[in-house]
Image (cartoon, rainbow, N blue to C red):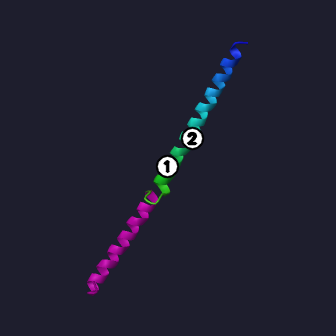
Amino acid sequence: MRSQPKIMRQEASLAKERLVQGIALAVLLLMGAFVIAGPSGIIAWTENQHLLEERRVKLAELRLDGIA
């Protein structure tokens, strides 16, 4: 009968460890999502690079026209 509480403690410890691992995994996945799709993530960075290039072209056109 003495092994029963020990087994229950091991199961509780295992459950707690799995919960902590699950939370850690969720946090890592969330951080990864922000790296890819966040306001300063990879997708936003490539879009900003594209907009910057378009604006540089527009600025060069305006300078050639003598407007800027």
Rendered view: 17 above or below 40: above
Q: Secondary structure at mark 1?
A: helix
- Under mark 2, the amino acid is Ile
- Tell which of 65 and 19 is nearer to you: 19
- Tell which of 13 and 46 is nearer to you: 13
Rendered view: 32 above or below 68: above
Q: Examine the image and state in which quarter residue 60 appears.
A: bottom left
Q: Mark 1 to mark 2: distance in Å? A: 14 Å
- Tell which of 22 and 58 is nearer to you: 22
Residue projecting furthest to the right: 1
Neighbor class of circle 2 (other Cα within 10 Å; few <14, some 14-19, many 20+) is: few
Task: Characterize the magenta stretch by its predominant secondary structure.
Answer: helix
Q: Position of residue 51 (x, y in %)?
A: 40, 70
Q: Residue at x 71, y 17 (%)?
A: 4
Q: Residue at x 33, y 75 (%)?
A: 57
Rendered view: 66 above or below 1: below
Residue identified by numbered label 2: 23
Q: Quadrant of the N terminus?
A: top right
- Under mark 1, the amino acid is Gly
Residue identified by numbered label 1: 32
Q: Residue at x 61, y 27 (%)?
A: 13
Q: Quadrant of the C terminus?
A: bottom left
Rendered view: 26 above or below 5: below
Q: Position of residue 17 (x, y in %)?
A: 58, 31
Q: Nearer the viewer, mark 1 or mark 2?
A: 2
Residue 50 in magenta stretch = yes
| Left or right, 57 with reference to 21 | left
Instruction: Write the start and end of the magenta stretch as one range.
Output: 42-68
Q: Secondary structure at mark 2?
A: helix
Q: Position of residue 50 (x, y in %)?
A: 40, 67
